[in-house]
C-alpha cells in the first residue's frame, strides 16, 4: 500500500478488501433506519392470506376431506380482486417499474449463464460462507429456522439455487406470471412468515431473538445485504479473485436485474440505481455488517461439512477450505474457525481458477463458443435443479419447512455424516484442477523462455 493511501482519510480496509469511502456509502443512521424497517406490504398480505386460508378450513370442517396445504400464490391469484391489501400486493408485483429495460434484463440473464461456474463458486464460497454465516443478524435467523443444520442444508441450498436459476433462465421466466416471477413472490411471502413466526416467539421470550440488536428478521438492511451477495460480491470481489473482470456493460446489466428482484422482494430499489451505489452497499456491508460470532462458526462448519464428499465432484474439506481462504481471506476464515489446509490445496484451487478464467476469455474471443456455453449451462443447471426437486423436501415450492420454536437452535453437527464419503479414493475433479495448474505453469515458463529468447535475438546477442 502506498503512503498516500495510508494517510487518505477516506481509505477503508476490512476483511482484506480496500476501498474509498464516498457519499454513496451508508451512514450509521441510514443503517439503523434500514434495520428498523421491513416489507410491510408483504407482511400485511400474509396476514390476509392466513385469514382466507383459515376461513377455507372452517368451510371444509363441514364433512369434506381436508384440503392439501394451500399454495399461497394460488390463494393470491384466486382472491386478489376487490380485496384491499391483496389487490395492492398483486398490482405492485404485476406492474413493471419504469426502470426495467427487458433487453438489459435478458443480457444480465445471459451473463449469469455465461459465467455459471464462477457464479456458483462465488454463491457457495462467498454468499453462503461469508455473507450469510458471518453476518450475525442473518446467521441468527438461519440458525433459528434450521436452514443451516446439515440435514436441512440440501433443501435450503437446492431451493435457493433453483430460484436463482429460475430468475436467470429466460425473459419469460422473470416477467409477470413466469416461473421465476411467481417463485419470487412465494419467497417474499416465505420471508414474511419467517418474520411473523420469529417475532411472535420473541414477544413471548425476548432473549429468543434480540430484535433491538438485529432488527426484525429479514428487515430492509438484511435484504439489501442479501441482494448484494447475489449481484455485487461476484462483480467486484468474487470474480476478480478467480481471474474474471466483468466489463461496464455486464456490471450495469447484472445490477439492473437485481434491482428488479429487489422490487419484487419488497427490498428498497434506490440503492441499485447505479453500479456506484450498488458497490457502496456491498462495501458498507463488508465494513459494518460482517462480524463472525459463535453461530457463524457453526453455520460455516455445517455448510462445509455438508458439501464435503458430495457426488458427483467429491471435493475434499481441505480443497473447500483453501477455496474459502482464497475467496474470503485468512482473517475472515480464521474468525469462522476454518482449518488451514496445506499449500497443495491452494494450488488445486488455483487450477480451478485457471480453467474458469480460460473458459471465460475463450468465450469472449469466440462468440459461437459463448453462445454454446450459455445454452449448455442454462439447460444443464435447469435440468439439474428440476431433477433434484424431489430432494428439496417440504410441501411445495418455497414452502416454510423449518418452523422455529423456542427451544430450537442448531449446533455443530458431525455425527450425521460420519462414514459418508470416499476420503481414501482419488478425487478426479481436484486432480483435473491440479493438472490445469501444472499446465498453466508450463505455458507460463514457455512464454517466459520465448520472451527471453526474442529479447536476446533483438538485442543482437
Ligand atoms: C432479498 C433477497 C433474498 C432472496 C432473493 C432470498 C431467497 C430465498 C429463497 C429462494 C428461499 C427458498 C429456499 C428454501 O425454501 O429453503 C429463501 C428462504 C429463506 N430465506 Fe431468503 N432470500 C433473501 C433474503 C433473506 C434474508 C435477508 C434472510 C434472513 C435474514 C432470509 C432468510 C430466509 C429463511 C429463514 C428462509 C427459509 C425458510 C424456510 O424454508 O423455512 N432470506 N430465501
Image (cartoon, rainbow, N blue to C red):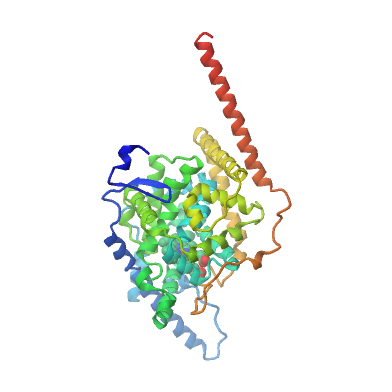
Q: Residue at (46%, 68%) from the top-left corner?
A: 140
| Residue 322 vertical position relative to residue 413 in the rendered view, above or below | above
Q: Nearer the viewer, residue 447 or 358?
A: 447
| Residue 133 vertical position relative to residue 278 in the rendered view, above or below | below
- Where does the C terminus fall, quadrant-wise? top right
| Residue 359 vertical position relative to residue 62 in the rendered view, above or below | above
Is 445 left or right of 249, judged from the image as shown? right
Q: Nearer the viewer, residue 435 or 176?
A: 435
Image coordinates for residue 416, horizontal then vertical, percent: 65, 67
Is 157 left or right of 96, judged from the image as shown? right
Q: Quadrant of residue 82?
A: bottom left
Image coordinates for residue 244, horizontal then vertical, percent: 48, 40
Is 45 left or right of 178, judged from the image as shown? left
Q: Is residue 251 visible?
A: yes
Q: Quadrant of residue 211?
A: bottom left
State the residue lying farthest toward the bottom: 62
- Where does the N terminus fall, quadrant-wise? top left
State the residue lying farthest toward the top: 460
State the residue lying farthest toward the right: 425
| Residue 360 vertical position relative to residue 421 in the rendered view, above or below | above
In this rendering, the count of numbered labels is 0
Q: Nearer the viewer, residue 84 or 41?
A: 41
Q: Is residue 264 visible?
A: no
Image coordinates for residue 109, horizontal then vertical, percent: 46, 49
Q: Residue at (33%, 51%) from the top-left corner?
A: 280
Image coordinates for residue 131, horizontal then vertical, percent: 45, 57
Amino acid at each position: 500500500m502506498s503512503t498516500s493511501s495510508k494517510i487518505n482519510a477516506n481509505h477503508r480496509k476490512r476483511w482484506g478488501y480496500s476501498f474509498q469511502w464516498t457519499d454513496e456509502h451508508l451512514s450509521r443512521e441510514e443503517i439503523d433506519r434500514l434495520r428498523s424497517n421491513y416489507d410491510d406490504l408483504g407482511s400485511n398480505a400474509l396476514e390476509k392470506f392466513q385469514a382466507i386460508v383459515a376461513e377455507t378450513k372452517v368451510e371444509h370442517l363441514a364433512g369434506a376431506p381436508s384440503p392439501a396445504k394451500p399454495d399461497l400464490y394460488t390463494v393470491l391469484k384466486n382472491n386478489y380482486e376487490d380485496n384491499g391489501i391483496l389487490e395492492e400486493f398483486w398490482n405492485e408485483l404485476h406492474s413493471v417499474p419504469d426502470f426495467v429495460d427487458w433487453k438489459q434484463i435478458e443480457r444480465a440473464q445471459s451473463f449469469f449463464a455465461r459465467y455459471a461456474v464462477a457464479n456458483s463458486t462465488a454463491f457457495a464460497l462467498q454468499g453462503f460462507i461469508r455473507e450469510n454465516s458471518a453476518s450475525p443478524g442473518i446467521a441468527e435467523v438461519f440458525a433459528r429456522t434450521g436452514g443451516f443444520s446439515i440435514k436441512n442444508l440440501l433443501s435450503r441450498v437446492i431451493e435457493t439455487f433453483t430460484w436463482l436459476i429460475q430468475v436467470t433462465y429466460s425473459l419469460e421466466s422473470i416477467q409477470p406470471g413466469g416461473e421465476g416471477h411467481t417463485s419470487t413472490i412465494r419467497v417474499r411471502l416465505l420471508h414474511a412468515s419467517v418474520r411473523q413466526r420469529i417475532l411472535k416467539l420473541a414477544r413471548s421470550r425476548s432473549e429468543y431473538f434480540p430484535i433491538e440488536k438485529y432488527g426484525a428478521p429479514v428487515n430492509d438492511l438484511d435484504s439489501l445485504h442479501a441482494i448484494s451477495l447475489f449481484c455485487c460480491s461476484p462483480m467486484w470481489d468474487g470474480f476478480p479473485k478467480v481471474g474474471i473482470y466483468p466489463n461496464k456493460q455486464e456490471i450495469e446489466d447484472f445490477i439492473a436485474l437485481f434491482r428488479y428482484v429487489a422490487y419484487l422482494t419488497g427490498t428498497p430499489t434506490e440503492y441499485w440505481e447505479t453500479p456506484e451505489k450498488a458497490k457502496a452497499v456491498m462495501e458498507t456491508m463488508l465494513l459494518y455488517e460482517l462480524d463472525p460470532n459463535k453461530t457463524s462458526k457453526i453455520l460455516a462448519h455445517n455448510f462445509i461439512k455438508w458439501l464435503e464428499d458430495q457426488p458427483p465432484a467429491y471435493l475434499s474439506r481441505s480443497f473447500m477450505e483453501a477455496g474459502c481462504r482464497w475467496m474470503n481471506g485468512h482473517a475472515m476464515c480464521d474468525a469462522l474457525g476454518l482449518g488451514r489446509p496445506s499449500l497443495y490445496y491452494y494450488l488445486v484451487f488455483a487450477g480451478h481458477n485457471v480453467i474458469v478464467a480460460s473458459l471465460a476469455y475463450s468465450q469472449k474471443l469466440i462468440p459461437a463458443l459463448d453462445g454454446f456455453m450459455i445454452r449448455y449451462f442454462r439447460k444443464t443447471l435447469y435440468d439439474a435443479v428440476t431433477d433434484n426437486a424431489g430432494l428439496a423436501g417440504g410441501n411445495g415450492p418455497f414452502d416454510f419447512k423449518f418452523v422455529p420454536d423456542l427451544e430450537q437452535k442448531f449446533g455443530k453437527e458431525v455425527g450425521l455424516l460420519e462414514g459418508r464419503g470416499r476420503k481414501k479414493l482419488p478425487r478426479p475433479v481436484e486432480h483435473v484442477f491440479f493438472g490445469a495448474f501444472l499446465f498453466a505453469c508450463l505455458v507460463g515458463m514457455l512464454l517466459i523462455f520465448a520472451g527471453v529468447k526474442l529479447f536476446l535475438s533483438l538485442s543482437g546477442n
